[in-house]
Amino acid sequence: MGSIKTKKTAFNAIHHILGGKMVEFAGYEMPLQYKGVNHEHETVRNGIGVFDVSHMGEISIQGKGSLELIQKITTNDALKLYPGKVQYSCIPNDIGGLIDDLLVYKISKNDYLLVVNASNIQKDLDWIKRHNSFGAEVTNISDSVSLLAVQGPKSVKVLQKLTDINLKELESYTFTIGEFAHIPNVLISATGYTGESGFEIYVENKYAAHLWEAIFEAGKDEGIEPVGLAARDTLRLEMGYCLYGNDINDSTSPLEAGLGWITKFTKDFVYSGFLKIQKEKGVTKKLVGFEIEGKGIPRHGYEIWDHHHQIIGMVTSGTLSPTLKKGIGMGYVCVENAKSGTDVFINIRNKPVKAVVVTTPFIKK
């Protein structure tokens, strides 16, 4: 049996030159960190950091029937999209869980781009094609696209040097296509995963090295730095954003995950009948945020207990918040324990550590 070859993004050689600590992630060799997670986290919160997120998947849906297909497979209402608008949505399966969460970009009439999680590209593709009874053209373009996320309060100032597009006018969850760093047809969107202002920049692979150099040259006086997956995780967790595979998966419903706001019953989608009943009856478990009181770092898979030390749930994501300097996490608990202010205990190495349920985001921007 031959082993599956780990993929490399177009920025791979740059990560090695910069001394990135490389790990396998979703089938790709990716930088976990460069100078350290806390340092990189602070860089994004206070300045500007650059993430290689080229491992993300891009699926093009074009032609007649493209809108109908998207409406069928996603929970949000794609009718609300207009050219230049992005929508956060999810793909439900037929057993009440989630195949993926994703971004839907409307490029023009009958031309959409879906940005999906790296580990789910093939799964999503198979599912979309299976439900394509509308004649839409479905193409996986992931291997030809490079993607950088530039995040932090200094991102507008730095990136504005590289384009005539007025980046200040690019509202959250919108995008534009134009020239950037002398590269044609660059897709620039404002859909960050950190809670900071910032942009995602999509280019063809052949422009990847040039894009990196141009951005770092433009940001050298502002302390621009590369950021790895570890800080990406602490940044998104401070904002209470779900991570597929941790906080949502094939067996978690969007309603349990607090994604009711992107689950629209004004249309029919795959398994919408079941989710509608679930909404009417009410869910039995809910994804909540919690903060540790005292010492201890919650980790994925740790048990959540009530004050009788009965298991009421499980930690799905947890870390030591670099901003708050305390343990924070998310996890599913029984509905009766989900109210903000409820005391719970996290089983950390067979010791109950007190925590309190809080509303997310953990840091208010």
Image: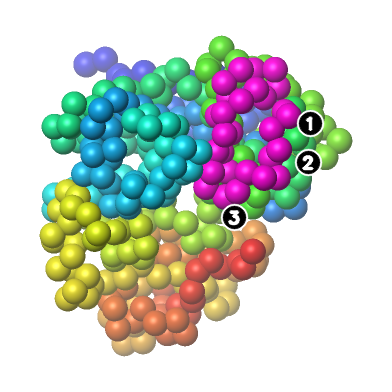
Helix or strand or loop: what does disc 1 sit on? Answer: helix
Seen from the viewer's position, the closer of residues 136 and 24 is 136
Q: Which residue is mark 1?
A: 161
Q: How busy is the neighbourhood of tag 2: few (under 14 within 10 Å), some, or many (20 plus)? A: some
How far apart marks 2 and 1 lie (CA) works out to 7 Å
Answer with mark 1 or mark 3, whichever residue precedes in sequence.
1
Answer with mark 2 or mark 3, whichever residue precedes in sequence.
2
Q: How busy is the neighbourhood of tag 3: few (under 14 within 10 Å), some, or many (20 plus)? A: many
Q: Which residue is mark 2?
A: 157
Please say if 207 is above or below 177.
above
Residue 347 spot, x, y in % from top left: 39, 71
Please say if 150 is above or below 95.
above
How far apart marks 2 and 3 lie (CA) works out to 17 Å
The label shown at residue 82 is none
Q: Amino acid type of disc 1?
A: Lys
**Of marks 2 and 3, the one in the foreground:** 2
Q: Assign the C terminus to one quadrant of the image.
A: bottom right
Q: Amino acid type of disc 2?
A: Lys
Among the 4 quarters of the image, the one containing residue 157: top right
